[in-house]
Image: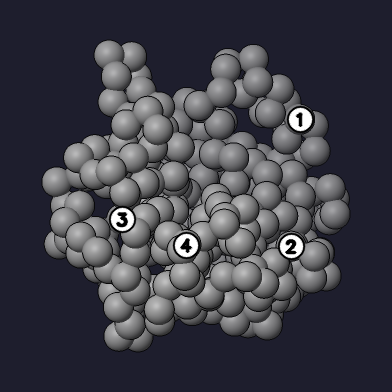
Amino acid sequence: MAAAAGKARVVVVGGGVAGSLLAKTMQGHADVFLVDPKEYLEIPWAELRSMVEPSFAERSLIYHKDYLTDATIVTSSAVSITNDAVLTADGQSLPYDYLVIATGHAVTSPGSRAERIKEFQRDNGKIESSGSILIIGGGPTGVELAGEIVVDYPDKKVTLIHRGPRLVEFIGDKASKKTLDWLTSKKVDVLLQQSVDLGSLSDTEKVYKTSGGETISADCHFVCIGKPLSSSWLHDTILKESLDNKGRVMVEKDLRVKGYNNIFAIVGAYQARSSPGIYS
């Protein structure tokens, strides 16, 4: 794969919103390669709406080829990097002048757009066929899913369990209270400072025991807890010393990885400061 004459070769690893937008913006100005195990970009803020209305996914799952008309799409996972190349799971070696890491959080979405739509349809089938639903996790995902379900299916009994003292804890107390008030006004049962043993969950389980000793009956459940960063593939690479203890890539103000002039990280990156720092 020879680089286009006179153009720098830019390899972008990760086809989420950040990586895809960067690749789209740079195509035509550089010889761009997007490395992603999926054949599509998923608009993440439409995911939960697609679970209650699967047809919505037709608009929120966009083939990479439809917007990257002047770039090369490599449908594979990156497994390692060297000082001048990205190695992929299917055995390719992609030389780069500039590398951008945009792998974000670890997800297990299928590579095929059609299969992803089928996932939404299966989740919707679970919701429609269940009279009662347990949602585990009271962060933004769990709260939004509960909201989507009770708006579209007001007769479903929804229980949300969260181990923290309040919902969506990263926002202010007032916003957390408004969130709780809205959910309870829609008859969602919210259990705070309790958890469910994730290791004991199964698709056939209908009764769940909480850490507080309560018993919850539900026809199905959805786990909505935070996903780890997708940086484990960097542990044995030249960037192993560039990861902090949370797996974030440490960067400078301009998002260059510390110690490198031609490697950037734009998702799952952290700039350490005397203040809490900048996290993207």
* Image location of residue 16, percent across then percent down: 55, 58
Q: Earlier in the sequence, mark 3 or mark 2?
A: 2
| CB within 8 Å, label 1 to label 4 | no
Per the image, the residue denoted by label 3 is 231
Per the image, the residue denoted by label 1 is 182
User: Which label sits in the foreground, 2 or 1?
Assistant: 2
User: Which label sits in the foreground, 4 or 3?
Assistant: 4
Q: Which amino acid does label 1 sit on?
A: Trp
Q: Distance between the residues labelled 1 and 4?
A: 53 Å
Per the image, the residue denoted by label 2 is 60
Q: How far apart are marks 2 and 1 (CA)?
A: 27 Å
| CB within 8 Å, label 3 to label 2 | no
* Image location of residue 148, percent across then percent down: 76, 50
User: Which label sits in the foreground, 3 or 1?
Assistant: 3
Q: Which of marks 1 and 4 is nearer the N terminus?
A: 4
Q: Along the line of sight, which residue is nearer the eye, 141 or 180?
A: 141
Q: Which amino acid does label 2 sit on?
A: Ser
Question: Which SS class for mark 1?
Answer: helix
Position of residue 133 relative to residue 34, above or below, is above
Q: Earlier in the sequence, mark 4 or mark 2?
A: 4
User: Which label sits in the foreground, 4 or 2?
Assistant: 4
* In the image, farthest residue toward the bottom: 90
Position of residue 169 relative to residue 231, above or below, is above
Q: Earlier in the sequence, mark 3 or mark 1?
A: 1
User: Which label sits in the foreground, 1 or 4?
Assistant: 4
Quarter of the figure that contains the N terminus: bottom left
